[in-house]
Image (cartoon, helix red, strand yellow):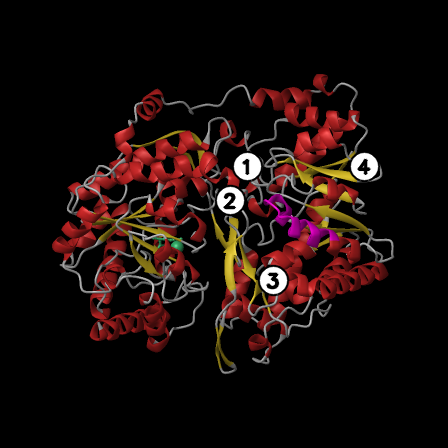
Amino acid sequence: MKTSIIGYPRVGALRELKFATEKYFRNEISAEDLQSTAKEIRKTQWTTLKNSGLDFIPSNDFSFYDNVLDTAVLFNIIPQRYKDLGLSNLDTYFAMARGYQGESGDVKALAMKKWFNTNYHYMVPEIDSNTEISLTGTKPFDEYKEALDLGVQTKPVITGAFTLLKLLRYTDNSNAQNFADSIIDAYCQYFNKLDSLGVQWAQLDEPYLVHDLTDADIELFTKLYKGILQQEGNVKVILQTYFGDVRDIYNQLTDLDFDAIGLDFIEGRQTSSLVESNGFPKDKILFAGVVNGKNIWRNNYKKTLSALTQLKNSGINTVINTSCSLLHTPYTLKNETKLTQEYTKHFAFAKEKLSELAQLKELSELDSYESSPIFAHNSALFNERVNCVDKEVQKRVSEIKENDFTRLPEFAEREKIQKETFKLPLFPTTTIGSFPQTLDVKKNRTAFKKGEISEKQYVEFNKNKIAECVKLQEEIGLDVLVHGEYERNDMVEYFGEQLKGYLFTEKAWVQSYGTRCVKPPIIWGDVSRTKPMTVDWSVYAQSLTKKPMKGMLTGPVTILNWSFPREDISIKESTYQIALAIRDEVLDLEKNGIKIIQVDEAALREKLPLRKSDWYSEYLDWAIPAFRLVHSGTKPETQIHTHMCYSEFTDIIPAIDNMDADVITFEASRSDLLILDSLKENNFKTEVGPGVYDIHSPRVPSVAEIKSALDKMLTKIDKTKLWVNPDCGLKTRGTAETTASLKNLVEAAKELRNEN
Ligand code: GLN
Ligand code: ZN
């Protein structure tokens, strides 16, 4: 059996691409410098993959920002407003990704959305009837040649036509069908070009197929590929799916003329049974995704090999593949110097997964792999893990009662009490929590971690920052203040580091959007809180002001979703353990005089099953109660806020309302304000702060722009329920743009108050 991966991490093992890109944005290095860093990263990747013995090596999985955007640009799907800037290709691309404000003009970025059920975000390309789809880019060809020059034969990867058409945003009344013919042409041109370069295999990613599909979807997919596969030439096509199974289209898929089909055996709950009951064509290769591309635990060879053996016995020509791109795992355990072998032997990051693929290949070729020492060594890993059981924690979870999920009195009563308590103006202004993590803030934290400064010095510095931040917010005139989160590297890692049951890493970065990365901690065992985690900072911040200071916590679902979860107990069980820990923190904050507490559930939607039919039964039925468990013990006058990133919860509005928070802030500025209609339709009771400007971009919104967003919101939201805030935390922004933006925000709120 041969081996393959779908894609590899691309930001560089030490995030070289991120640092170079940021320098480029600050005009500290040239485009050529940036290109050469990128080239170096690609070279390292290809060499690593080749040396690992991998048979199918991807190319064009590299990106300066996002692969969907890359594919759109390849096919000239570039809105006119970006072309009009008259910038270089690279800068036009970056303008689409992050917006542009400068001599050539002022345009916002494209919308950004969560990539399926991951914490990666893709850019949503826009199209309208004026868009002329055609092959205008060269990136996959250039990168293919670049690899070939290094002696590496690769399979270029792009987003497939169907997924692309499904993910695009149609800005006029055009739709996917209208573009079917021109997209077929463009993909044919693409394959012709690959053919002329001598490409042997090419991969088209079609993850959209793991959704619930309508008849129209299936028809569109079939039409597209009947067209695309007509092109002559010698390039073999791998139709690659991931993040689930393709139950709605399995037969149509296997009937089409693909040379290989990639299926996910990890997240695709029905993949095995689909293959078993429908069979798999003998003239095609099955790329079997049996090595988890998302999690970091060692592969269980026994399970994997028995699945592979079954495929082999059914006469299926199989390639051993990862379940999805390794983009979602960190680079390598080699950079982890602090975790002992006791722990690390249970993990496999991207590079280690390459060894797993090689070992699986080796074992699959043996007559009786059971007697191989490699196999024995792997099996032993699953018998025991140190320090992972805490009977106390398990007992506490088992004793949770039904009424622990309900906060009393109910919302309407609390809302009245809180209006009395806080006496905030109409349209209260606030921020989401973090303030710019400037260089000095990061330096202070690093110095403390390295032991270069004392704890006292570390705390002193942060207290000064908090004091400055409070002063700044008072000057700007915000109503509900925050402490700025200077002590936090990341909203989940910060808690992970303090919770028992967690392990944390040094360099295990995973890409989130653009070249931004997060470092998810690892849930190793049963989770509990050993001491207050945020109380001192919040109490200090509150002591500096008469205005309400928000306590700032991360919710249990988000902590779980942004950690690497265990595979030996359910994620529901882990989430309840975390919920109890956060509940204790909420009650401690309240006891210490913090009257508003925000519990961020930024990633609530993340693990929402991709198929609607599974939403409640598999997820929301425990995820929403987990949040309620966190705040059900608070007094009626304590105001509970929550925050969610990305407003894509139009379809789960009742569930969100059911979290029973008093106020929710969410991202709305990058998407249409469509969500507001749903809030209205669903009689949303929770007070809302839809973000009035986009913090993912350095652009400063004008007062008029914010005011007009607010005016729109007011047509759908009762004026007593509307809050005014940016759409997410400000930590990635600079100080100057933040101050300017917040001043405009407060000004817009004031104008609105005058009119109401
Ligand atoms: N409170 C966090 C912050 O402001 C929320 C971050 C997030 O939603 N991703 O940084
Ligand atoms: Zn957010």
Q: Nearer the viewer, mark 1 or mark 3?
A: 3
Cβ–Cβ below 8 Å for labels 1 and 2? yes
x and y percentages locating residue 28 in the rendered image: 51, 71
* Amino acid carrying mark 4 in the image: Pro
Q: Residue 69 bears which disc, if any?
A: 3
**Residue at 55% from the left image edge and 37% from the top image edge:** 296
Question: Mark 1 or 3 closer to N-term?
Answer: 3
- Given residues 63 and 577, the one toward you in this image is 577
Image check: 8 left or right of 659? Answer: right
* Residue identifier under label 2: 508
Q: Which of marks 4 and 1 is nearer the N terminus?
A: 4
In this image, 105 relative to 499: left or right? Answer: right
Per the rendered image, the range of residues in magenta is 207-222
Quadrant of residue 359 in the image? Answer: top right
Spatial CA distance of label 4 from label 3 is 33 Å
Q: Which residue is drawn at 30% across and 36% down?
A: 629
Mark 3, Cα crowd under 10 Å, few <14 / some 14-19 / many 20+, is many
For marks 1 and 3, give the CA distance.
27 Å
* Residue that extends furthest to the right in the rendered view of this protein: 233
Q: Up-down: is 18 above or below 389?
A: below
Q: Main secondary structure of the magenta part?
A: helix
Q: Which amino acid type corresponds to the residue marked 2 in the rendered image?
A: Ala
672 sits left or right of 428 in the view: right
Please name which of the two marks, 1 or 2, marks the residue nearer to the observer: 1
| Distance of label 4 from label 2 (alpha carbons) | 40 Å
The residue singled out by tag 4 in the image is: 281
| Left or right relative to 499: residue 356 | right
CA neighbours of label 4 inside 10 A, class few (<14), some (14 to 19), many (20+): some
Rendered position, 42 above or below 631: below
Residue that carries the numbered disc 1 in the rendered image: 296
Q: How far apart are marks 4 and 1 (CA)?
A: 32 Å
